[in-house]
Image (cartoon, rainbow, N blue to C red):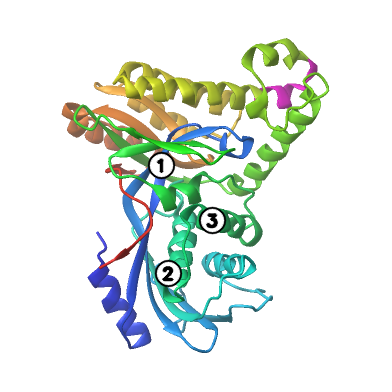
Amino acid sequence: MLSASMIRESFADVFGRACRVFTAPGRVNLIGEHTDYNDGYVLPIALSQKTFVAAAPREDGLIRCWSKQYSRLPEPIEFKIDAASRAGEADWAKHIRGIATCLVRDQFKLQGADLLIDSDVPIGAGLSSSAAIEVAAGFALLKLSDQPIDLVDLALAAQRAEQEFAGTNCGIMDQYMACLGVAGHALLIDCRSLEYRAVPLATEEASVVICNTMVQHELASGEYNVRRSECEEGVRRLSAHLPGIVALRDVELEDYDHFAGSLPPVIQRRCNHVITEIARTVEAVEALERHDLETFGRLMYASHDSLRNDYEVSCPELDLMVEIATGCEGVYGARMTGGGFGGSTVNLVANQSLPAFQATVSERYLERTGIRPELYVCQSGGGVREEH
């Protein structure tokens, strides 16, 4: 587990001076997958695993950044805050340039900085390591420059950075959660209004366990953008029957059932997932608030079935992980989480069953795939902050 003192030591080794340390968490979404860019609801938690950004100001408008995880060269990557070119830049550094550029566009007066990035958010596990980098770096740059910070505005700037610089046409959930996570709670986020409320987790009864399949298929990022365009096509076609809708969030289940037959089969399946997933998320929050973990788990299983069959973003490894979990005692529910095509499942497991669950999943997944998975029992953490 990383600590602020470890990051300070690393920063001194690379840059030779003292620094401040900022962190932003990864996240796992309990339910509400691929609903955020359809103006729907999501229910994520912020993780105790975090991305660390150690930072110290510069007076020359230059940003120098180095990553303990990604940097292949001994020297930091350098760029001017207002520089337009990013040809040949490492993928991880695009997140830094992206958030800096978006904040400058928003009229924040940023000064240069030396940045060192490290993280214990698993990479490629669908736990939003990229949003954690963007939010932690943006927060650091604003703090070093003595600029006012509105966490919703920071989340929106980080979302634009992901879209424009990383090429993922994402919704707001990941960046929002990195900014506004509440320890011990899930966050129900309305991705249209950006209103949110904290929903307590029944941690005395059950724990959230992430099972990392350790695979990430290449088509993940491209297919994400395809799914978004398919949803937009569904809205366009349904608006001929339902004037005034602007997103799938606006389509009631009863209306959709009446007009679904007018859609091409693929578009119909995509819309079916999103519209039913939004309804499942609302029902899941109600179940969580009355401590009905059985209903919550049933909705998790239904979400996975929909993601596999209608949205077609699962993969054999994710399906196998859910299948194994389904056979374990004390499991309320399991589903894939994140963009899909690899990454992780999220599971709700009775606390007394945790040791047996971890052992069974690890053993059976290794037997079936030859891959040793990573499992994380989650603690719901808070949002971006400065570490003292």
- Give the vertical position of 54 relative to 340 (above or below): below
Query: In the depicted view, which residue is nearer to us: 256 or 117?
Result: 256
Q: Position of residue 139 (x, y in %)?
A: 44, 65
Dot 3 amino acid type: Asp
Disc 3: CA contacts within 10 A as few (<14), some (14-19) or many (>=20): some
Q: Position of residue 180 (x, y in %)?
A: 41, 49
Under mark 2, the amino acid is Ala
Image coordinates for residue 359, horizontal then vertical, percent:
22, 35
Residue bounds of the magenta highlight: 262-269
Is residue 9 at least partly visible in the picture?
yes
The reply to whether the magenta stretch includes residue 265 is yes
Q: Which mark is residue 28?
A: 1
Q: Within the image, what quadrant is residue 333 found in?
A: top left
Q: Main secondary structure of the magenta part?
A: helix
Amino acid type indicated by mark 1: Val
Question: How would you rate the neighbour count of disc 1 (Cα within 10 Å): few for under 14, some for 14-19, many for 20 or more?
Answer: many
Q: Secondary structure at mark 3?
A: helix
Q: Quadrant of the N terminus?
A: bottom left
The residue lying at 31 percent from left, 29 percent from top is 348
Tell which of 246 and 119 is nearer to you.
Answer: 246
User: Foreground mark, 2 or 1?
Assistant: 2
- The residue that mark 3 highlights is 153
Residue 128 among magenta residues: no
Horizontally, residue 216 falls left or right of residue 272, namely left
Q: Quadrant of residue 310?
A: top right
Q: Position of residue 245 (x, y in %)?
A: 73, 27
Whether residue 310 is visible to the viewer of this picture, yes or no, is no
